[in-house]
């Protein structure tokens, strides 16, 4: 089970929502469900009972899973594609007889697991069961799913740019690596969070003012 699966289940468990869980390897499935009170392990024989299937799996496995197990499901089943790198329209074209919708997480699975309040992007209004599942653990926005991929790329680029520049400057100042690691994993992320939520402290506000004066 991947990080996204754990993050989603953590939040659904907190929200009091029972979720059926499937994995082809029974040991992994049961290991996962034992961690969450409201996670229920199911088998292939149970698939016909579900009207909604959440595909929290790697992009390369989405089409493979549907192709292998489609006949187990109801014809009216809605499949939820959560793989950021897997275009939903591409899957829909492969399986035109099925209902496949996107529900992409704008953000990081680790953050979702820890804090909840996810931001989920879909290209079309979703049915009530799907809306209930995701609105219980965050907010749903209707937009192009490519927005999530573009956002992830932009955030990743500038996060790594900042990290490598900080490392280089710390090395120039002969700062011990043990401090640099904490600066990268604790100080910088929390400063960014405070900035985004407009909760900077006095020192942070002074630094921000200086930066804005330099850019003006």
Image: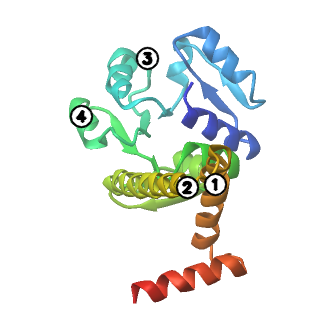
Residue under label 1 = 183
Q: Are marks 4 and 2 in contact (CB under 8 Å)?
A: no
Depth order, front residue of 95/118: 118
Which numbered disc, 1 or 2, marks the residue that appears first in the sequence?
2
Q: Which mark is residue 173?
A: none
Which numbered disc, 3 or 4, marks the residue that appears first in the sequence?
3
Q: Nearer the viewer, mark 1 or mark 2?
A: 2
CA separation in Å, label 2 and label 3: 56 Å
Which numbered disc, 4 or 2, marks the residue that appears first in the sequence?
4
Q: Position of residue 213 (x, y in %)?
A: 47, 89
User: Residue shown at 69%/47% (left/top)?
Assistant: 114
Q: Are marks 1 and 3 in contact (CB under 8 Å)?
A: no
Q: Position of residue 97 (x, y in %)?
A: 27, 32
Q: Are marks 1 and 2 in contact (CB under 8 Å)?
A: yes
Specify the quadrant of the image occupied by residue 198.
bottom right
| SS at circle 2 | helix
Label 4 CA crowd tier, 10 Å (few <14, some 14–19, many 20+): few
């Amino acid at each position: 089970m991947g990080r996204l699966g754990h993050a989603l289940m953590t939040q659904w468990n907190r929200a009091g929502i029972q979720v059926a869980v499937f994995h082809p390897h029974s040991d992994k499935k049961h290991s996962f469900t034992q961690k969450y009170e409201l996670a229920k392990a199911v088998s292939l024989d149970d698939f016909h009972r579900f009207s909604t299937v959440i595909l929290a799996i790697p992009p390369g496995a989405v089409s493979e899973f549907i192709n292998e197990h489609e006949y187990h499901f109801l014809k009216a089943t809605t499949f939820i594609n959560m793989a950021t790198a897997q275009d939903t329209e591409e899957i829909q074209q492969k399986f035109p007889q099925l209902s496949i919708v996107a529900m992409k997480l704008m953000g990081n699975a680790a953050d979702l697991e820890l804090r909840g309040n996810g931001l989920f992007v879909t290209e079309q209004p979703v049915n009530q069961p799907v809306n209930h599942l995701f609105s219980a653990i965050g907010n749903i926005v209707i937009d192009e799913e490519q927005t999530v991929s573009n956002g992830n790329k932009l955030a990743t680029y500038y996060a790594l740019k900042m990290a490598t520049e900080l490392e280089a400057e710390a090395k120039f100042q002969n700062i011990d690596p043990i401090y640099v690691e904490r600066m990268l994993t604790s100080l910088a992320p929390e400063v960014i969070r405070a900035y985004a939520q407009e909760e900077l402290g006095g020192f942070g506000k002074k630094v921000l003012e200086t930066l804005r004066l330099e850019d003006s």
